[in-house]
Structure formats: C-alpha cells, structure tokens
Image (spheres, grey):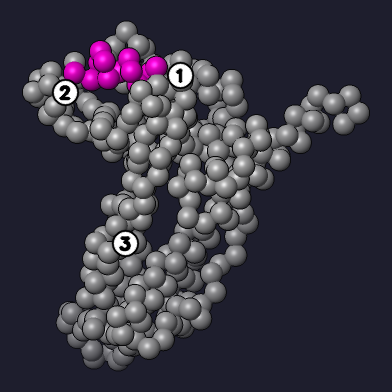
C-alpha cells in the first residue's frame, strides 16, 4: 500500500468509525499530506547528475518509511519555524496513521512509536476575569436581531463551556429551556448533557421566542433549518464569523486580554474550579475523555488564587 492510499484509509476510519469532527479530520489530513510531500521530495531528489528531474517520483510505499525518516520530517518542521507543540501534533497524526496500518495488518510495527516527541512546556491557558466576562456578555446590541442572537450565544458559551464548533452546530431540538439543559454531540461522536444557568436560559428564550424567526424570514421561517443559531442567509453561524464577532465585542467592551471563543471555555472551567467544583464534574461538562486534559485548569485556578492572595493579604 502506498502512503496516499494509507492516508485515505485512515481518514475514512476517522470520519466513519470514530466519528471525529470535520475540523479534527481536516487537521489530521493536513499533517499527513505534509508528511507525504516530505517523503516524496526526498525520493524525487536525483541520485546522479544525469537523472531526469521531470519524471514524477513513484508512490511512497508505507513499508519503506522508518523512524529516521519521521525524525527527519520533524527536524525539518522545527527548522522551518514551526512551534514545538505544532510539531508534536504532527507526530501524533503520523503515529495514528501507522497505528491504523498495524490494526488493519498492513504493517507489523509502528515506526513512529520509536520517535520521541519534542519537549515543550505546559502552557497554562489565560482566562478572562469575572468583570471582563460581564462586560463581554453585555456588549451585543440587543436592539438588533443579530445582537440578540450573539447575546444568547455568548451566554450559552460561558454557561456551558462548549467548544465553538459544538455551539455553532447546536440543533434547536437538543436544547430544553424548560428543564434547563442541552444535549451536545462532541468529539468522537460522544454525547453529553450540559446544564444551562438561569441567565443563559433567559437569553436563549428571548432569542428563540422573538428573534430566530426574524433572521430566517426570507428563507421560509424558523422551520427551514434545524440549527439553533442562524444568520440571515438561512444557515447556521460559522465558527469563523462567531470568532470575528467576539473580537468585535471585546474591542467594544475595552477588554485588553487577547480573546477568542475558546477563551470563554477556559474561563468557564477555571471559574468553576475556583468556586470549588470537582475536577471530574468539570471534565464531564467539558467533554474531555482524559482527566489529564482537564488537570491544566487546576494550575490556572491555583495561580489566580495566589495572585489574589498576594494582592490583598496584608502580609503577603
């Protein structure tokens, strides 16, 4: 099997069997196609001056790839200025590919398992203060349909800690305002139930009752799409558009902290832990499969508590 065929098989596995999101699958595909390009370039270098450089290189057979070639790819990525974390992610994609090839018995060994990931420090996510969250939530102009929608989206994001893609692709029927919870399908096609706070329920009720139909008026009304958060084009809000909206609202609210949708997810988790929430509960709410992923937020909470102590204790 050549490398392109192997990648196609792996991507199909990620989409159909594991049910990963489009964004995650696209990231795997980009990493692996970049690795394919590297392997192909190495094999296309002429071995002598008389070689014909216009002849396309033969397909890269997966059995010809070893740990040394994978290490060379990583070294080239680092030399090209890629961040250590980015290169580590690319290695994870390659490991996943070869693990898949072992599973379907194309290979007997995984050459990537012998390659060490580059070392990088654990990055502690920066979060918004409570005051900054309040200013951000108040920024949308609720005199406009878009403002009411964005007000509801921001409240929902901070109240639930959803990933931005999960928020934008939320189906209306999966939100129960009377019971105060929503159901979301996260990474790996895993379902989780997340409670909504009272303020988020109020914001959503205002949007669903009075605004959503106005945005869809030119496309057949509220029943023309199952998505909860929509635009005047009759489609669901995109993550890119919502990202731009958040930046615009942060500027309007005079928030100096660099901001993106994921920062509200970080803030959601950190503020819960600061107020005594159990780490396992936060893990469940965030949809993390590994508790170690959630553990990073304890470092954020501890650092913030230490800062508050030093600022306010008379003998700090």
Q: In the rendered view, tell whether residue 203 sits above or below residue 62.
A: above
Check if mark 2's residue and mark 1's residue have beta carbons within 8 Å.
no
Which callout, 2 or 1, points at the residue further toward the start of the chain?
A: 1
Taking 287 as reference, is 171 left or right? left
Magenta region, residue range: 202-213
Along the viewing direction, whichever of 172 and 23 lies nearer the viewer: 172
Q: Secondary structure at mark 2?
A: helix
Q: Residue sitting at 61 percent across and 50 percent down?
A: 295
Quadrant occupied by the N terminus:
bottom left
- Residue 199, position as x, y percentages in the image: 45, 19
Measure the C-alpha gap from mark 2 to mark 1.
23 Å
- Residue 137, position as x, y percentages in the image: 46, 20
Q: Residue sitting at 26 percent across and 60 percent down?
A: 15
Q: Residue sitting at 31 percent across and 85 percent down?
A: 105
Quadrant of the rendered image containing residue 140: top left
Total labels drawn: 3
Q: Secondary structure at mark 3?
A: loop
Q: Main secondary structure of the magenta part?
A: helix
Residue pointed to by mark 2? 222
Which callout, 3 or 1, points at the residue further toward the start of the chain?
A: 3
Residue pointed to by mark 3? 18
Residue pointed to by mark 1? 199
Quadrant of the rendered image containing residue 66: bottom left
Q: Secondary structure at mark 1?
A: helix
Q: In the rendered view, tell whether residue 209 sits above or below residue 258.
A: above
Along the viewing direction, whichever of 82 and 275 lies nearer the viewer: 275
Does residue 42 appear in this view?
no
């Amino acid at each position: 099997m050549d490398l392109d065929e192997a990648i196609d098989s792996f991507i199909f596995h990620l989409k159909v069997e594991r049910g990963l999101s489009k964004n995650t699958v696209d990231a795997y595909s980009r990493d692996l196609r970049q690795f394919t390009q590297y392997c192909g370039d190495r094999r296309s270098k002429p071995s002598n001056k008389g070689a014909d450089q216009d002849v396309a290189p033969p397909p890269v057979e997966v059995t010809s790839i070893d740990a040394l070639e994978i290490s060379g790819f990583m070294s080239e990525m680092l030399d090209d200025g890629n961040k250590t974390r980015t290169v580590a992610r690319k290695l994870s994609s390659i490991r996943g590919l070869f693990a898949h090839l072992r599973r379907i018995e194309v290979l007997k060994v995984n050459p990537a398992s012998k390659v060490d990931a580059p070392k990088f420090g654990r990055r502690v996510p920066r979060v918004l203060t409570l005051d900054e969250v309040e200013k951000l939530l108040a920024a949308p102009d609720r005199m406009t349909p878009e403002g009411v929608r964005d007000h509801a989206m921001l409240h929902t994001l901070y109240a639930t800690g959803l990933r931005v893609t999960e928020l934008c692709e939320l189906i209306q029927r999966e939100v129960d305002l009377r019971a105060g919870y929503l159901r979301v399908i996260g990474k790996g096609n895993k379902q989780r139930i997340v409670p909504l706070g009272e303020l988020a329920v109020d914001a959503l009720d205002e949007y669903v009752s009075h605004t959503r139909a106005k945005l869809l008026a030119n496309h057949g009304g509220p029943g023309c799409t199952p998505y909860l958060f929509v635009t005047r084009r009759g489609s669901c809000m995109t993550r890119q558009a919502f990202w731009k909206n958040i930046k615009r609202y942060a500027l309007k609210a005079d928030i100096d902290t660099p901001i993106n949708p994921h920062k509200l997810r970080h803030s959601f988790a950190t503020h819960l832990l600061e107020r005594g929430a159990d780490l396992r509960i936060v893990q469940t709410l965030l949809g993390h499969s590994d508790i170690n992923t959630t553990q990073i937020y304890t470092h954020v909470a501890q650092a913030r508590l230490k800062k508050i102590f030093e600022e306010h204790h008379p003998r700090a």
